[in-house]
Image: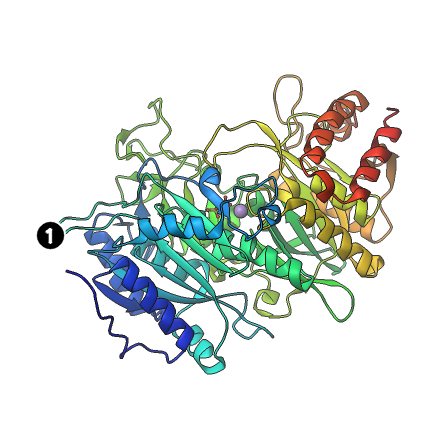
Amino acid sequence: MTLTSIDLSTAPTTHEGILAFVREVAELTQPDAIHWCTGSDEEWTMLTEALEGTGTFTRLDPAKKPNSFYAASDPIDVARVEDRTYICSVDEKDCGPTNNWMDPEQMKGIMRGLYEGCMRGRTMFVIPFVMGHLEAERPMFGVELTDSAYVTVSMRVMARMGSAVLDKMTETDADFVQAIHSVGHPLAEGEADVAWPCNDTKYIVQFPEERAIWSFGSGYGGNALLGKKCYALRIASVMARDEGWLAEHMLILKLTSPQGVVKYVAAAFPSACGKTNLAMLKPTIPGWKVESIGDDIAWMRIGEDGRLWAVNPEYGFFGVAPGTNEHTNPHAMATINKGNSVFTNVALTEDGDVWWEGLENPPAKATSWKGEPWTPESEELSSHPNSRYCTPIKQCDILAPEFDDPRGVPIDAILFGGRRKTTVPLLFEARDWTHGTFLGATLSSETTAAAIGATGVVRRDPMAMLPFIGYNAGDYFGHWINIGKDNDESKLPKIFYVNWFRRDEDGGFLWPGFGENSRVLKWVVERLDGQAAAVETPIGHVPAPGSLDVEGLDMTDEALAAALHVDVEEWKAEIPQIQEWFDKFGDDLPAVLWTELDGLKARLGL
Ligand code: SAT
Ligand code: MN
């Protein structure tokens, strides 16, 4: 069957741009049917039942996790594919040395070839969505066309989508980001579907000038839920460059002191380094309170008051499951236990629940993410290290009411952090905005399972944005520098650098992390208010002895000193790596960052 005339007469919109987009993609991809998503509960039920029918979803026991589902992916489709991700700017120079580039027309030629007829035997879902608030001064719309019901269901959790969004787009004739997604697995007449359709060939492509996203071959989160990394980071970072704001890979949290003083903190960590846990931190120090606003992405603009205001553009959490438990993240556990969630690549227990490494009470028997029988004695992991829960943010019991405020919250402090066994102390403060930008630009971390490739390798991950900067990273650093130059720095957030992952000689973690990280936040707040003492070191301001609250913590003075220690020799060894990193950018690296490096070298006695 060939879909030659696409009938859009019953489409629930008169928006010419949307209709033209749907028609063009349907003509190319040839779906059997087109479904305009409303975002209703009935639609959710229809889709989840259909996914049960194809074996993609297994319904969990409603008494344990109501309205929730288990899914296992094809083992070749478990994470973001950075080597298949492209920034197809018109000019290669605008892509920069940290992204893959191809000429946009050439890429479109390749992808049109892949898209031709790729939705045969499937339904094309039209998902109108908005990143951020529908009531924002300028709502940030998108339309994702996908042939995956799994993606549609997940998008409903992760983004505000459906009829209300489409109506507003129609009323205001709104501009929108065009996002095309296909799993790349057409079905011939009568051919049965597989549980996780995907394709060996994968492309995740951003066209920054057109603000368009074309994705092919994968059903995995960051490759397929196009509102998330593709739009809210890669495309949005380009918009932000052009318009003077910041689209960052940051959690947002609200911190209230025992005296009732409120501060807002944004923090950037690479994928799978504990952002979600920090966003929902349960403080161990008495009287302190954390509330969540976001766990992954922050859009930040300078407000009329000169402060940096942040919103979370998302509507759900897409968290790493392994390691999540009642101790590491009780609020995430409470959120997912309310149900309405999708669990992918974890283990399925015999009593209709999910389990993963690090969760309490291992089941005697389970089915692993690979579909194999699993017991606690099994050599293989029950769950993929990048297995995920996808759960509505509104279910979070510590969601700050400000989440619903389209203006967002004024950020007081920015934390940068990575995963480093050595060198980087638990906590230090940047000297000023430019130095903070230098710290962000040189952020380093050991790689994790969130992207395909070797794990545990130290790489530079500037502002935790390495896979997400939609343009030349040298220009991106310049943009950060300019935010400091063009604004009143005294009103901008102060910048800090943290490392929860430093090890002792025996390989054990020096710092207990999780809820105890509230102690680090406390020092940050006291620093903002000019209270906590710091010592100046070559790398920045480190907590002075006695200034970090460790009361009640089972930690020796030596261990604390080791966690905070600035080892000049280790830092000297970093310098050639930073130099090599900066060399990549040639003339595109802002000169002030070289000046910062020179300053660091001089302070280290080099
Ligand atoms: O890319 S995802 O959003 O799926 C997960 C991550 O890497 O943060
Ligand atoms: Mn992330």
Q: Is residue 556 above or below residue 251?
A: above
Between residues 212 and 283, which one lies in front from this camera angle?
212
Mark 1 lies on a secondary structure that is loop
- Residue 246 placed where, x, y %? 66, 57
Between residues 404 and 435, which one lies in front from this camera angle?
435
Quadrant in the rendering for residue 407: bottom right
Q: Residue furthest left?
A: 190
**Amino acid type at mark 1:** Gly
* Residue drawn at x 52%, y 44% as measured from the top left: 101
Q: Residue furthest bottom?
A: 171
* Residue drawn at x 27%, y 49% as measured from the top left: 57
- Residue 401 placed where, x, y %? 59, 66
* Residue drawn at x 20%, y 62% as measured from the top left: 32
Q: Is residue 63 visible?
A: no
| Left or right of 345 in this view: 458 | right
- Residue 502 placed where, x, y %? 66, 28
* Residue drawn at x 65%, y 61% as measured from the top left: 242
Quarter holding the C terminus is top right
Mark 1 lies within 8 Å of ligand 1 (Cβ measured)? no
Q: Is residue 392 above or below residue 386?
A: below
Instruction: Bin the neighbour count of mark 1 within 10 Å (Cα to Cα): few under 14, some 14-19, many 20 and up.
Output: few
Quadrant in the rendering for residue 565: top right
Return the residue at label 1: 190
| Left or right of 171 in this view: 459 | right
- Residue 141 placed where, x, y %? 49, 68
Quarter holding the N terminus is bottom left
Q: Is residue 371 above or below residue 590?
A: above
